Image (cartoon, grey):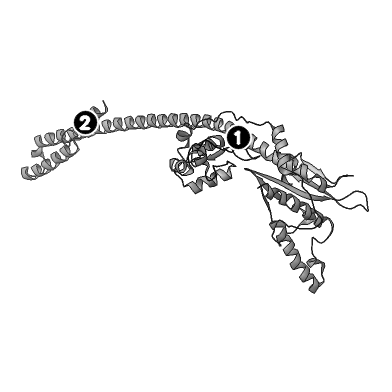
Amino acid sequence: MDTEFTRKELYDLVWSQPMRAVAATIGISDVALAKQCKKAGIPVPTRGYWARKQAGKPAQIALPPRFPGASDRIGGPPRNDYWGADWPERFKDVTIPSVPTFDEDMCSVEERSRKLVGQVRCGRKFEPAHPLVAKLLAHDEERRKEFAKQRHSLYAPKYDAGTARRRLLIINALFLTAARIECRPLMNTSKYVEEPGGKRDLWITIGKAHVCFTIEPIKSKKGGQSERLCLVFGRERDRSNTDKSWEDREGSQLENQLTEILVQMLLSAEASYRNGLARHREWIIERKAEAEAEIKRRLDEAERKARELQQKSERQRIGRLLSQAKALDRANQIRTYVESARLRVAETATGQSEFEKWANWAQREADRIDPVKNGTIAAAIEEHLDRS
């Protein structure tokens, strides 16, 4: 869809006339339009709505608030203003976005997120198991069969008990709830990935944001105590930039904090989206300033090269002028020499006929290098008139 709309603009449009008419105006099919609306959380008229509206009984569905972290923009042409050799000329016409504003403050978003998440419960069994978790459990079943044959710890199941099982149960609870509210969990499920200490980067895509987190075991400093689990936002290698973490504590294990954790994930996604809009606007402003500076630099460079080319051309013209003057001087020297020799031909050992042959050749050579005779001066005069 090449035309860009806000959610409110597209909502008003699809409720103003039938979907096929709207789709034809936009230039896409009604099926594609319905998919765009569904993806953006925009309700569309149900079957029979237009008949009920003509009968004076419209039942328009209100536009729900934007999902946390989701974009308020739908469609639009592909962004090609940022790259290419001619980016400054194209970028100077890019419109600076207005300062982003939002209908809800973050407190309202938090309240709505809590209602959306509900209660995240972590069971003691993988019933049901999220598809990603089910893959890990399938790998565990393969290890169990191999362990029955080899009886070696290398093939022992990983998720039968202990911290690893607790961790996977927590992941399962978070992933199931995330999927229920139409967020997309992601983790590496390869059986060949080693898990030192049970560490894996985990992701949940919420709207346009990708919230990364890890669930890591923390060994107790006191001997005899079991490992505690800690959930931290951000990738392990970028851990210094995060301030969001939860861990087992007395009276409240990590399993009892999952509701708050998922709510904070939604808020983190929304904050990321809002900050991204502000950063994008600042980037556009900076990029436009860079474009103007680059255009000026290129103009200055073009003017400098033009001046240098003109100066070089003038030097070449003067060089040609001096060369022509020297050629004319040499031609006249040859003619003078021939005439002087003719007056003294009697003093030579050659006859008059042989001398004339030589003199004719010398005259031809003089004419050949003479800029008046060979047309060089005429060309120079024409070039001068063209430049004037």
Distance, label 2 to label 1, CA atoms, is 62 Å
Secondary element under disc 2, as helix, strand or loop, is helix
Residue 282 or residue 276, whichever sits in front:
276
Q: Is residue 57 above or below residue 237?
A: above
Q: Is residue 367 left or right of residue 160?
A: left
Q: Position of residue 15 (x, y in %)?
A: 52, 38
Decide: few, some or many residues near mark 1? Use Cα within 10 Å; few <14, some 14-19, many ≥20.
some
Q: Identify which amino acid the numbered label 1 is placed on.
A: Leu
x then y, percent, for residue 212? 70, 46
Neighbourhood count class around disc 2 (C-alpha, 10 Å): few under 14, some 14–19, many 20 upward? few
Q: Which residue is mark 2?
A: 382
Residue at 70% from the left image edge and 48% from the top image edge: 178
The secondary structure type at the circle numbered 1 is helix
Q: Earlier in the sequence, mark 2 or mark 1?
A: 1
Quarter of the rendering containing residue 238: top right
Q: Residue at x 72, y 40 (%)?
A: 115
Q: Which residue is painted at 77% across and 45% down in the image?
A: 119
Q: Nearer the viewer, mark 2 or mark 1?
A: 1
Residue marked by disc 1: 277
Position of 92 compared to 101: left or right?
A: left
Quadrant where the C terminus is found in the figure: top left
Query: In the picture, residue 260 is in which quadrant?
Result: top right
Residue type beneath disc 2: Glu
Q: Pick whichever, 265 or 109, lies toward us.
A: 109
In this view, the residue farthest toward the top is: 388
